[in-house]
Amino acid sequence: MLFGGTMPTLLPGPRPMSPGNRAGLGAAFVLLAVVSAVEVGDDSSAQFVGLLAAVPFVAAVFAVWQVVLGVGVVATVVGAVLVGSAGVHGMSGLINLMGVLLATGVAAAGATIRQRQAERIAELLRLAAVAQQAVLRPIGPQVGALSVAGRYISATAAADIGGDLYEALNTPYGVRIIIGDVRGKGLDAVRLASIVLGSYRHVAYERADLRSIVADLDRAVARSVGDEDFVTAALVEERGGTLTIVNCGHPAPLLLRRGQVIPLEPPAPAPPLGFMPEVKARVERLEPGDRLLLFTDGLGEARREGEFFPTADRAWRLLGHGTVGDGLASLESALVDWVYGRLEDDIALVLLEYVGPDGDAAVPVPSWEVGAAGS
């Protein structure tokens, strides 16, 4: 006995019935009641008892085999009562009852196979989720002078797995963020995303400028993919209130400032990683309260009835208030409503807010960076 307390309960309590078992039981007993009512209301001999063989099959669609067996036993007992009340004797009634028993066995076997397959699929989905979480580590809520939130929205309801990627790191050269999108889907896309992020997590701490990081990532992608595979990416660096962005074929980030939404287009276009991009930087001076939305092309391509989601028009209303996490939640909700819950592509979202200097002195911007004037 624990001092000052009571003996803990060691035996588990009764497990609640799962929704699938409840659905199987409900559907089976509805059919059982219908067949019984028809048989009782019919004046002829027990000609509908054979229909009770369908009852365990209905249960097997949803329920586990133990429930199916129980439903089959109940159906057999009800069938025996109906046969006896109709005065049917001999082979006819026996055949009907044997048919219900045989159907029960077959349905229970089918439920066992379905249950094992469902468990295997669930295990694969858990492994996929683990793989995705290993690629996309949680970021934020504070990285240097930035409040940061990330969100991954999967187009596949069954599994959060794909090739969209993001990361935020506080390095000796400032806060550095990457967002990217691998061409393709599934495990191959996850593999390439993990290669890009693994390389980025190393070189972001080693390289003094974003151009060198892009070159390193480009080589990593080129070594790992075929001629037609690539990764679009945008890299962001915040140092002493100065924002530097390089873009490799990726959608332009959106700057939210005092009610305005400003697309931060690069000074010159550059191809994706894997095609030897030569990047030029977009430079902005940040103000406290500025927010920056980074996203993959699944957001820009989300549409209903041929009309694209109006990201720029709604960005301030959805993202300009509350915490950055609240903003991304509002954006996701509006997006899902827009497409009626059916996304065509995975979406990665990162929302940043500049909260002011974090005590570090401003670092001079490298000479290779090309400024873009004043938002």
Image: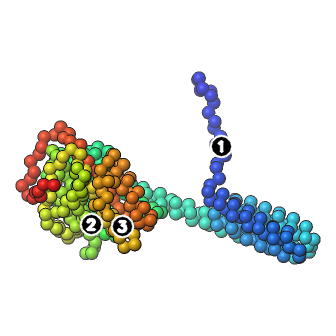
Compared across the picture, whether 131 is left or right of 241 comes to: right
- Residue 112 visible somewhere in the drawing: no
Q: Position of residue 297 (x, y in %)?
A: 30, 65
C-alpha separation, residue under disc 2 versus residue under disc 1? 51 Å
Residue under the point 62% across and 67% down: 113
Residue under the point 92% across and 73% down: 89
State the residue position of label 3: 302
Q: Earlier in the sequence, mark 3 or mark 1?
A: 1
**Amino acid type, residue under disc 2 in the picture:** Val
C-alpha separation, residue under disc 3 versus residue under disc 1? 47 Å
Q: Where is residue 32 in the image (x, y as percent from the top left)?
A: 76, 66
Instruction: Assess disc 2: are there few (<14), some (14-19) or many (≥20) residues with their C-alpha within 10 Å of its C-alpha.
Output: many
State the residue position of label 1: 13
State the residue position of label 2: 231
**Amino acid type, residue under disc 1 in the picture:** Gly
Compared across the picture, whether 209 is left or right of 149 comes to: left
Residues at discs 2 and 1 in contact (Cβ within 8 Å): no
Viewer-proximal residue, 256 or 193? 256
Residue under the point 91% across and 67% down: 85
Which residue is situated farthest in the left direction here? 367
- Residue 22 visible somewhere in the drawing: yes
- Residue 359's image quarter? top left
Quadrant assignment for the C terminus: bottom left
Viewer-proximal residue, 311 or 343? 311
Residues at discs 3 and 1 in contact (Cβ within 8 Å): no
C-alpha separation, residue under disc 2 versus residue under disc 3? 20 Å
Disc 1 secondary structure class:
loop
